[in-house]
Amino acid sequence: MLVLPLIVVFVFSFGARGPAGGYAPGFSLENFMNLGARWAAFKNTMVLAPVGTLACAVIAYPLAYFLALRVSAKRRTLLLILVIVPFWTSILIRSYAWIFILGGKGIPALIAWMGFGSIQLINTPFAVLVGIVYGYLPLMVFPIYVSLEQLDKRLLEASADLGCPPGRTFLSVTLPLSMPGVATGSMLVFILLMGEFLIPAMLGGGKVFFVGNALVDLFLQSRNWAFGSAVAVALVLIMLVTVTAYMRATRRWAGGRADVSLM
Amino acid sequence: MKSNPTEADLPIAELRKASKHFGGVVAADDLDLTIRRGEFLSFLGPSGCGKTTALRMLAGFETPSHGDVLLDGKRVNDLPPHRRPVNMVFQHYALFPHLTVADNIAYGLRQLRPKLPAADIAKAVDHTLETVRLPGFGKRRIWEMSGGQQQRVALARAIINQPKLLLLDEPMAALDKKLRRDMQIELQSLQRSLGITFVLVTHDQEEALSMSDRICIMRSGRIVQVGSPRDLYDRPKNRYVADFVGKSNFFSGTVDSVSSTTCRISTATGQMFSGISTQSLTAGQAATASLRPEQISLTRQSGHGVKVRIVALIFLGEHTEYLVRHDTLGDFLVLVPRQSEASEGRFDLGADAYATWADGAALILADD
Ligand SMILES: Nc1ncnc2c1ncn2[C@@H]1O[C@H](COP(=O)(O)OP(=O)(O)OP(=O)(O)O)[C@@H](O)[C@H]1O
Ligand SMILES: [Mg+2]
């Protein structure tokens, strides 16, 4: 059941566009040859998904660290809930908020008022990146939080006992032992970002297209299912390759440790 | 050997009226203790009596709420753990799971500044692995090691730094009995050969008795008595210590008379015990007579001692331990050596016998 839609998409990708849109059977590689027409969407996705994942990880780590190791147990629950609360409202509504903040009357207006000239924020890759980080941050915070929470605190004492100052202990004990959390979070966010279309549509204003937007367009507007399928197949292949490479790398990094699962 | 006699005579570490409060809990209460250079000292006491807290104050993980911690004569209350010349073997070892055995052991040396050459570190690690009898295990991962081997790695990781003080928090609690016995012997000989001062926490009295130069007996956050194993066995300060160190029979009563050399008490039913006391007692005060099982003997000849019945016996090879029952004194233990069994014969379960002890053999103890 899980792979059936995939098979359908795979078969469609070799077909042609029907006369009134949709799908007409056939077998040609033409769709794949034409992928270049959607190069911008692929490029944006391939750049912004990894960069967004990285930005999420960089921002989420200190947050998770603070929650797991620096806050009393009582306040921790409250703060964790605060991290989840944004999830209770739809990403659509939250994106509108960002449209306002980054739009002409938001931050750019403030900057202009302070006399730093005019800048364009909304409808740029930067706006999309902000939206991505904002939307996916909780997804990154939680796995990192869990791995830091489960970290055996006696190891930190052992490190101090052996003459290691706190900063160096963070680098040589805390960070390596919480890497599984970072890896899990990154994987989750990366995979979801590769399929993202809402945030680029809203904050990219039709200028920053993702593959996801291309798919929406091809399936729902142009109704060229065959070409859409080819785009989807290409995306799945790219994901397969990157995710496999990523898992290999993290596994090698962990040195085959039995007690660490990196998904 | 003593290049600097004043330093060598100085105690290596001291607790001075050191207390630690956790909220309302007093984990350590006014601890006064001098740790001598090169000795093997044990903290002995039941669970929750503050042994770990005392150790953690020495290591620097806890700052005393009151009082002082001294290392080498210097007050170190505010010196963080990474700056103290002290190393600890943690109760569950706390080995770094992401590092190999060799990297775990090298961890302390790698923290030194200026950095040591890698070749020197590798040599020291190999040497230490040999000391703890794990040669060639350096490349292994921690989870590939058995419990006993992990314990040795933890030990190696600490001693490679040649600390002034090595703290061991129940290092053998997780080992089985046979392995524990081996490790005890090894630890003791290691302490002698390294010349490092060892402070061991344990709640196993046999372990403390067999390994330590001195034992510090603790009870609910306080130090009850400090002394050599023999001191504590022969001259326990009170009933608590006598009960904790070795086996003993206790008979409570009131003090009849006190002289300069002996003290005499009688139980409610009129049985008399006499012997020396380790605290000053006054007539009429409640006190307890303590008799070690080996101080009591059994005979079949009536007219000697008190009449008892054998209710249980355990054959221990060299000795047989009898649990005997007396009408008014209750049950107590008697340890009969093999050669006296040869003259008296064996006593069977349910048989009658007479229990005797030398006049003045008992220890008369205050209850606290
Ligand atoms: N961090 C802490 N916070 C609150 N209470 C604590 C803390 N550490 C210890 N205690 C309390 O202090 C008392 C002494 O604890 P400690 O760990 O020193 O006992 P222990 O003698 O080592 O016991 P065990 O043999 O079980 O290890 C206990 O009542 C314990 O509950
Ligand atoms: Mg303890």
Image (cartoon, rainbow, N blue to C red):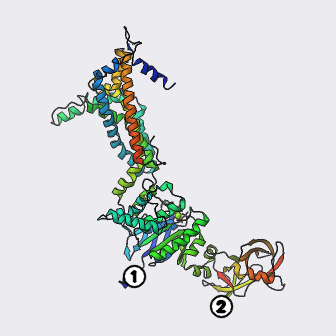
**Residue type beneath disc 2:** Ser
**Which of the two residues, B285 or A73, is positioned nearer the viewer here?**
A73
Q: Name the foreground residue: A125 vs B49.
A: A125
Task: Please state the total of marks drawn on the protein image.
Answer: 2
Amino acid carrying label 1: it is: Ala
For image coordinates 34% across by 14% down, the residue present is A222
Q: Is residue B246 left or right of residue B307?
A: left
Query: Which quadrant: the C terminus of chain A?
Result: top left
Q: Is residue B24 in view?
A: no
- Label 1 chain ID: B
> Nearest the camera: B206 or B110?
B110
Residue that lies at the very extreme toward the bottom in this rendered image: B260
Residue occupying image coordinates x 37% and y 27% = A235
| Real-space Cα separation, disc 1 to disc 2, in angstroms | 42 Å
Q: Which mark is residue B8?
A: 1
> Could you say where residue B302 lies in the image, as x and y percent from the top left?
84, 84
Identify residue for label 2. Answer: B259
x, y percent for residue A254: 42, 48
Residue A54, percent across and down?
33, 40
Residue B156's quadrant in the figure?
bottom left
Residue at mark 2: chain: B
Q: Could you say which is closer to the camera, residue B7 or residue B278?
A: B7
- Horizontal side of B368 relative to A261 (left or right) equals right
| Viewer-side label of 1, 2 | 1
Q: Is residue B111 above or below residue B1?
A: above
Res. B273 image quadrant:
bottom right
Q: Residue at x 17, y 37 (%)?
A: A114
Residue A168 visible in the picture: yes
Earlier in the chain: of badge 1 and badge 2, it is 1
